[in-house]
Image (cartoon, grey):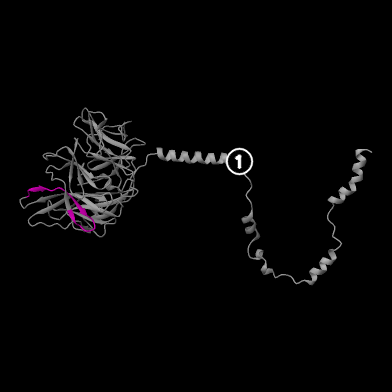
Amino acid sequence: MSANDRFERRLPAILDSIAPMRAPEYFDDILGQVDRTRQRPGWTFPERWIPVSAITNRLAVAPRVPMRLAIAVILLILVAVVGTLLLAGGRQRVPLPFGPAANGLLVYADDGGEIVSADLDGGAPKTIVPGPGNEHPVFSPDGTQLAYVYREAGNKLWIRVAAADGTSPRTIHDEPLTAVGYLGWSPDGRTVVVSRQPTLRAFDTVKGGPPSMMLLDLQGVEYNEGSLLTGLFRPPTGQEVLYLGRSGKEGFGLYRRAIPDGEPVALVTDLHPTIPFGDLGSPAWSPDGTQIALQVLAPGTDNDWRIYVMDADGANARRLTHLEIPDTVVSEGNPAWSPDGKQIAMQPWFFDEAGSADSRPITVVDVATGEEHEVGPANVGGYANWAWSPDGESILEVPNEPSPYAGRVLVVDAVTGEVTETDLTAASAASWQRRAP
């Protein structure tokens, strides 16, 4: 018998096994039983209330993942996490341009025209930009860059920008300057701002090229080393500035405007004065951008300057302090907001009836209450500069002659007034680096 004969004999059985099922012989009996039985109400079935897919999805078993694939996925995730942590750790954290920050390094120019860096928590000072000819170093608001003046033979002045450690210096303009009244930064750290009466000129440190004139017709304004130029830029974006100037419609006064080409908005002017004044000076935004501090000269006086605080639109102007001394004119100047915006430091002078001046120490005033207290020594010759520490707990001072502290870098506690005299000697203004808290 051949194999084909065996297959042919089995073929009927195979076809019968794979054929569609026939109804069983008892099928008619089942139909009869169903017909006699009452059906179950539809509302008792869960699938009428809960979608069947919800049940099946919940009970579905996840497909098996090959072990090698699972291990590979886990390793890729670990590599991504480690890479993210390394990237975050390698990227320098920088502070916001406004508000409290951590105290970083101190920089200043010494008598030999070198720029020196010092850590006030310890460590020997070190030269980061060799001299001679360097003056007025100032850190950018984020603490990553350093701008300074280089004085060339023939009194030609150049603005240079370097990294915070003094490396990679570069000149940011093509034509030399003949005078620099003040050197500072815009809040975004992109622009260096230089004053030369009656204008402020801005140099783009990224693109370079000729300077742009930021503010024009600045009459009666002195931007000196003791001023805080960053106070002109409105927080938190810095895209609006305060300035003292003139307008044909409003006259002389305090204005604000968006930069670079916004329309001036009058806040306090002599044609529409919200407060009486003979002159104005040293405007400064609060760190949150909601208030303005302003130096106001009483009408008909020469020395009766007082600090006023007002809202951003010029409303609700009020005098900051309440100090009155018989037969004495109290003159308050150079208001500087603390980093947290709760206090204002200023430099007072007392004038007697003969006009003789008595220099007073830097005075710290509580903005909410007007309570004030003096801190540190009185310096008849004024200061090369003074400013709040980044954390707002101290005031940095560099007094001028004839102070016994002349040229010394002082750190004054803003609460107790205690003076810490450092071993550092600065020939010009000092700058305290801001770091991320």
Tell me the quarter of the picture where residue 119 sits.
top left
Q: Amino acid at mark 1?
A: Met
Please identify the quadrant where the N terminus is shown.
Answer: top right
Q: Is residue 313 above or below residue 375?
A: below
Q: Residue at x 92, y 45 (%)?
A: 9
**Foreground residue among 379 and 55:** 55
**Foreground residue among 234 and 104:** 104
Q: Is residue 54 above or below residue 96?
A: below
Mark 1 falls on what kind of element? helix
Does residue 347 appear to the left or right of 96 in the view shown? Answer: left
Residue 31 placed where, x, y %? 82, 67
Q: Residue at x 93, y 41 (%)?
A: 5
Tell me the quarter of the picture where residue 133 sits.
top left
Tell me the quarter of the picture where residue 320 sits.
bottom left
Does residue 255 appear to the left or right of 362 in the view shown? Answer: right
Is residue 312 rendered magenta in the image?
Answer: no
Judge the density around disc 1: few (<14), some (14-19), many (≥20) Cα neighbours within 10 Å.
few
Please identify the quadrant where the C terminus is shown.
Answer: top left
**Foreground residue among 2 and 188:** 2
Residue 124 placed where, x, y %? 24, 33
Which residue, as the protein is rendered here, is positioned at the far right? Answer: 1
**Foreground residue among 83 and 202:** 83
Residue 350 visible in rendering: yes
> What range is drawn magenta here?
355-372
Is residue 356 rendered magenta in the image?
Answer: yes
Q: Residue at x 27, y 46 (%)?
A: 391
Residue 183 visible in rendering: no
Q: Residue at x 28, y 36 (%)?
A: 147
Residue 10 placed where, x, y %? 90, 45
Residue ID for mark 1: 67
Residue 100 placed where, x, y %? 30, 48
